[in-house]
């Protein structure tokens, strides 16, 4: 009877389990294995030619100035992108939740649209908008400013890349904050208003503290997501100019592109470690509540 | 990220309750600010639509302009006649269909088992689902590619679709939904002597409509917008999906600055999902409100 139940259960799980084993479990273990070898693209047909090299790839990674630079680039993307995305998302959620009754649904739809929009298409638009004689510079020249060639400037390319990331994701933050705001009981505000608390004091002493769990969740979600940033720099600049926008994920992809599968896997494990670290923090912070 | 956000979006009640009445002085200002933000958000969409409808000559003479003087569909015609976008479109649709069917089948079965069946290894299996949600794509794509090559699926639509055919998020959505269905319902059928598969097909699945709808929409979105994996697997134009085709066209056209063609391509890639989003927002809401996810 027990054996039968187990068989039935696993039969139901089988389609998912097969794909999971083939495309998540085995690849994760394999990537760890690859990262400890000198595997190259040309070795795939002759697996026996591959040598075990221990932690050599990892040592090489941290001796590689490009990889260290890419970690800093990724950190910059997270450090600037997360607060910006959250700030815009929170402001919009607050406005939609407390100030606006008409057109609420329409506004929400508009602000969420970038989230479902295809990134390749959007990046294309972004490229032309920030082109030397693109839309942005046209607007600037209308007010008498000479616009730079944004994506070819090592100092200006990253802000544009971050801006695209923020544009694509603030809708996500907004919707999460909206859900959090709607969970705050209305009578708390009424009681505060009776006690003479103004809007700013209500925001500071009621909204923000009660929204803390949502804020933590959004920040962790975005951090994990932005740590893996790939699409925006790949499509806008391919990591350039001079590597100023290359992220860790893009480094991994470029190493894969030149056939350095061992190095690529090692870099991806450094990222996995970072993501796992943040995820563990997430579980720690969110568990007690739910 | 898209999917998680959409989930939350859905979990939110369609009509939010209004909060305490505020002083109305700030209202016009607030609306003005929101309208500004909305316009800024929509600007790229307007610009791409305008650009896609302009002729090549018009764009060359005035590259930064917004709206076409003469509306033409010439860019779209060229896209499908000479750039192979017909093929890419068909490929995207085929891959999305495989992904949606795969997710509905795999996630319905797995989600039901994880929520409603008692068996050895269930906790382990659920742990695997949660772990799979966390593993970064960058970590697994190299071995995934090696496996795809070994299976003889490189440069094929099946190779592109397969990894996404049983997304952990779909399983999670179905499990959460299944938890909300009373055990008594299934127990009654068991007492009547119905087998597990009969119960699944005759009792559970008919009740799981909202979750199936959500999974359909989510997995379609994931598949349609997926870019890196198809980029890695597709090696010839024969198996390009729309995003990969657009990226390739964009790289090829960068020197000739054929904006109109690329913007038309962007429209073809974006439009299906945006239309779907506009019309199915309600189904997102209904679907996931039922899963009890918050």
Image (cartoon, rainbow, N blue to C red):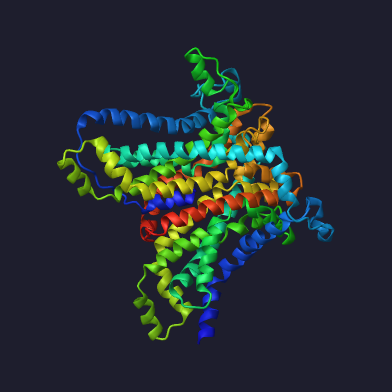
Residue nearest the observer in this picture, A22 or A94: A94
**A169 left or right, relative to B20:** right
Residue nearest the observer in this picture, B28 or A239: A239
**Does residue A76 appear in this view?**
yes
Q: Is residue B89 above or below residue B22?
A: below
**B24 left or right, relative to B88:** left
Q: Quadrant of residue A204?
A: top left
Q: Residue A117: x and y, percent? A: 50, 42
For image coordinates 25% across by 31% down, the residue present is: B27
For image coordinates 60% across by 44% down, the residue present is: B242
Q: Is residue B149 above or below residue A255?
A: below
Residue nearest the observer in this picture, B274 or B73: B274
**A19 left or right, relative to B39:** right
Q: Residue B109: x and y, percent? A: 50, 69
Q: Is residue B181 above or below residue B272?
A: below
**B141 left or right, relative to A289:** right
Q: Residue A72: x and y, percent? A: 60, 38
Quadrant of the image containing the C terminus of chain A: bottom left
């Amino acid at each position: 009877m027990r054996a039968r139940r187990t068989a039935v259960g696993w039969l139901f799980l089988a389609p998912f389990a097969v794909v999971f084993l083939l495309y998540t479990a085995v690849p994760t273990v394999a990537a760890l294995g690859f990262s400890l070898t000198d595997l190259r693209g040309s070795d795939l047909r002759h697996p026996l030619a591959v040598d075990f090299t221990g932690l050599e790839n990892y040592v090489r990674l941290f001796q590689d100035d490009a990889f260290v630079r890419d970690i800093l680039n990724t950190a910059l993307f997270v450090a600037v992108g997360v607060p910006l995305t959250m700030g815009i998302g929170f402001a919009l959620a607050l406005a939609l939740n407390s100030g606006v009754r008409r057109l609420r649904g329409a506004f929400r739809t508009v602000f969420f649209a970038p989230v479902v929009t295809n990134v390749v298409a959007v990046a294309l638009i972004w490229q032309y908008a920030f082109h030397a004689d693109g839309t942005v510079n046209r607007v600037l020249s209308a007010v008498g400013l000479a616009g730079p060639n944004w994506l070819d400037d090592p100092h200006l390319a990253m802000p544009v890349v971050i801006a695209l990331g923020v544009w694509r994701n603030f809708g996500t933050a907004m919707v999460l904050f909206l859900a959090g705001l709607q969970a705050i009981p209305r009578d708390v505000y009424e009681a505060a208003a009776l006690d003479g608390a103004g809007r700013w004091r209500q925001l500071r002493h009621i909204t923000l503290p009660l929204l803390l769990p949502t804020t933590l969740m959004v920040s962790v979600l975005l951090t994990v997501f932005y740590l893996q940033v790939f699409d925006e720099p790949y499509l806008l600049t391919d990591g350039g100019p001079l590597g100023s926008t290359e992220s860790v994920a893009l480094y991994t992809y470029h190493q894969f592109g030149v056939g350095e599968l061992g190095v690529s896997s090692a870099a991806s494990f450094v990222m996995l470690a970072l993501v796992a670290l943040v995820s563990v923090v997430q579980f720690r912070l969110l568990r007690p509540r739910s | 990220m898209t999917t998680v956000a959409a989930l939350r979006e859905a979990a939110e009640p369609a009509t939010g309750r209004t909060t305490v009445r505020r002083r109305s002085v700030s209202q016009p200002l607030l609306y003005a600010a929101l309208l500004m933000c909305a316009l800024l958000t929509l600007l790229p969409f307007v610009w791409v639509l305008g650009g896609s409808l302009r002729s090549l000559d018009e764009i060359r003479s005035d590259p930064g302009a917004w709206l076409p003087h003469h509306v033409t569909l010439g860019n779209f015609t060229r896209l499908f006649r000479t750039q192979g976008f017909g093929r890419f479109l068909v490929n995207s649709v085929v891959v999305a269909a495989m992904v949606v069917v795969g997710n509905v089948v795999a996630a319905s079965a797995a989600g039901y088992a994880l929520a409603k069946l008692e068996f050895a290894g269930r906790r382990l299996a659920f742990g695997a689902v949660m772990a799979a949600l966390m593993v970064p794509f960058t970590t697994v794509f190299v071995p995934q590619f090696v496996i795809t090559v070994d299976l003889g699926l490189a440069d094929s639509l099946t190779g592109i679709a397969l990894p996404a055919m049983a997304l952990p998020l779909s399983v999670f959505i179905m499990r959460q939904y299944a938890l909300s269905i009373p055990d008594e319902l299934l127990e009654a059928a068991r007492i009547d002597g119905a087998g597990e598969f009969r119960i699944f097909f005759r009792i559970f699945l008919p009740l799981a409509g909202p979750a199936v709808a959500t999974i359909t929409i989510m997995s379609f979105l994931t598949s349609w917008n997926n870019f890196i994996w198809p980029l890695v697997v597709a090696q010839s134009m024969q198996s390009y999906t729309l995003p990969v085709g657009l990226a390739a066209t964009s790289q090829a056209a960068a020197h000739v600055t054929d904006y109109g063609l690329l913007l038309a391509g962007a429209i073809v890639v974006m439009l299906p999902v945006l239309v779907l989003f506009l019309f199915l927002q309600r189904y997102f809401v209904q679907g996931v409100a039922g899963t009890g996810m918050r």
